[in-house]
Image: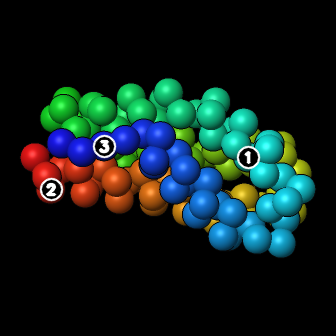
């Protein structure tokens, strides 16, 4: 099983940076801090799925909760507009979900 949360974290930041390209220079540090605050929870969800403790549906449910937490944190970073925050959270969670899916295929 190949899953590196550090690489996933960097991918999440890159995905958010792509979505928030215009705002990125002003919010990058705050977004990184917000993601670091959520990283342990996200890693726990990914690990639980990779270890077979939860199924895909439960993982998606838990990721939906974390996506909301990220959205709130991103709004606190003064990302312009709710839609931009939602897109950034979506992009970040998609990177994590894709990484878990790829790691599961290697098992």
Residue 29 percent coordinates (x, y): 80, 44
Answer with mark 1 or mark 3, whichever residue precedes in sequence. Answer: 3
Mark number for residue 44? none
Above/below status of 29 relative to 23: above
Helix, strand or loop at label 2? It is helix
Is residue 59 in view from this perspective?
Answer: yes
Residue at image point 53% right, 33% down: 39
Tag 1 residue: 31
- Circle 2 packing at 10 Å, graded few (<14), some (14-19), many (20+), is few
Rounded to the nearest whole Å, what is the CA distance between mark 2 and mark 1? 30 Å
Q: Is residue 94 left or right of residue 27?
A: left
Q: Is 57 in front, or is 90?
A: 90
- Circle 3 packing at 10 Å, graded few (<14), some (14-19), many (20+), is some
Q: Is residue 42 left or right of residue 102?
A: right
Tag 3 residue: 3
Tag 2 residue: 105
Q: Nearer the viewer, mark 3 or mark 2?
A: 3
Q: Is residue 94 left or right of residue 45?
A: right
Rounded to the nearest whole Å, what is the CA distance between mark 1 and mark 3? 22 Å
Q: Is 50 in front, or is 84?
A: 50
Residue 74 percent coordinates (x, y): 75, 48
Helix, strand or loop at label 1? It is helix
- Circle 1 packing at 10 Å, graded few (<14), some (14-19), many (20+), is many
Residue 10 percent coordinates (x, y): 55, 50
């Amino acid at each position: 099983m190949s899953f590196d949360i550090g690489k996933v974290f960097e991918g999440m930041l890159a995905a958010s940076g792509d979505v928030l390209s215009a705002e990125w220079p002003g919010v990058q540090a705050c977004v990184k801090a917000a993601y670091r605050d959520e990283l342990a929870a996200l890693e726990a969800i990914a690990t639980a799925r990779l270890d077979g403790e939860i199924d895909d549906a439960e993982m998606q449910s838990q990721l939906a909760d974390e996506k909301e937490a990220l959205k709130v944190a991103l709004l606190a970073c003064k990302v312009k507009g709710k839609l931009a925050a939602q897109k950034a959270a979506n992009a970040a969670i998609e990177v994590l979900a894709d990484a878990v899916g790829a790691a599961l295929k290697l098992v």
